[in-house]
Amino acid sequence: MLDYATRKAGLKPFGVSPFGLDKFSPLDVPNLLLYREADQEGIVKDGSNFVSSLPDLSLGAHTFAQGTGNKQPQWIDNIQNGLPVIRFDGVDDATGDQLTHGSTVISGSGPRTVMVVGIQRGIGNYDAWLRLGTTRGLKIGPFIQTSTANKPGIGASTSITDGIARFNGLTLNNVPVIYTARCLGTNYSSANVEFWRNGVALSFSDGFTGAMNTSGASIMGFGGVSSRHAQWDFIGDCAFNRALTDSEIASLHRYFNRKYNIY
């Protein structure tokens, strides 16, 4: 396990980690603007392991924080492949667990790639795991709402008509999942968005072609629809302000899969 200072500096020691991984990590991929894992150093927790601050290991320095006790998720050890998760319980509609960063991680309408690793802990009226921006912000996760149903995918956060790209595939409950979205920018549409679950491309289902022009705060555990909060375990995530290549995405999948035994 790399110490927080080493990973924050983007440096990795020689040799093989205790997980049998090579030296690759998301820090090796250019244009990294957000990178966190539940096992990292520097997470601020109270005596009951409720999380008030989750630092960004990239040079983007997008620390997510929550000062209100009843809104803090809980760090729980030895959940996935012997490693911890940060659990968002999704119990309270209006005051559920969430961590917030004061500005968007990836602003504007340019290309982006976002990967989130986690475990859904309940099938129900929940929304996205991660929302990068409050105004037309990209949200990603197993539940992206239209007026009639939820499916995995990405979408804007202020209104379903602002832009949504949803994909076919049942939500997997209590199963670790890597969701990956590669966006060419401009808008949310089948022509501009690709979506993977555990390395398998999902076919486009439906959506609204809205502008991808992101600004505002970023939030974990709250997608922005009807004050709903997600019930899930956070394992890790990373975000880039460009469309990664297939090879880069495959390397990131391999990193998270080998470390956490995702699929």
Image: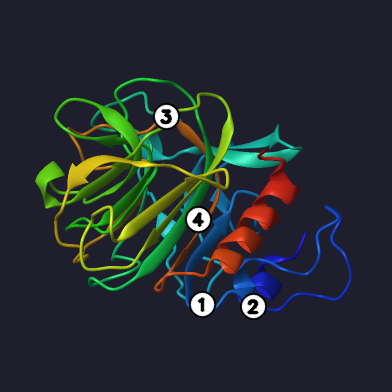
Q: Taking 35 as reference, is 160 above or below it?
A: above
Q: State the CA–CA distance, disc 2 to disc 1.
A: 8 Å
Question: Which residue in the structure is indicated by mark 1?
Answer: 59
- Is 247 placed above or below 100 here? below
Number of the front mark, 1 or 4: 1
Residue that appears at 52% across and 70% down: 245
Q: In which quarter of the image is residue 47?
A: top right
Q: Earlier in the sequence, mark 4 or mark 3?
A: 4
Query: What label sits on residue 199 in the rendered view?
Result: none
Residue 108 place in picture, x, y as percent:
23, 72
Instruction: Name the residue beneath numbered marker 4.
Output: 54
The residue that disc 3 covers is 231
Amino acid carrying label 3: it is Gln
Estimate how packed mark 3 is, as few (under 14), some (14 to 19) or many (20 or more) residues with alpha carbons within 10 Å.
Answer: many
**Quarter in which the C terminus is drawn:** top right
Q: What residue appears at the point 60 percent right and 49 percent down from the top-left corner?
A: 38
Q: Which of 47 and 184 is in front in this view?
A: 184
- Mark 2–mark 1 contact, CB under 8 Å? yes
Position of 59 with respect to 142 (left or right) is: right
Circle 2 packing at 10 Å, graded few (<14), some (14-19), many (20+), is some
Amino acid type of the residue that numbered disc 1 sits on in the rendered structure:
Leu
| Picture mark count | 4
Q: Disc 1, disc 3: CB below 8 Å?
A: no
Label 2: state its secondary structure.
loop
**Marks 3 and 2, the one that precedes in the sequence:** 2
- Image coordinates of residue 258 in percent, x first then y, are 74, 49
Dot 4 or dot 2, earlier in sequence: 2
Residue type for callout 4: Leu
Rounded to the nearest angstrom, the CA distance separating label 1 from label 3 is 29 Å
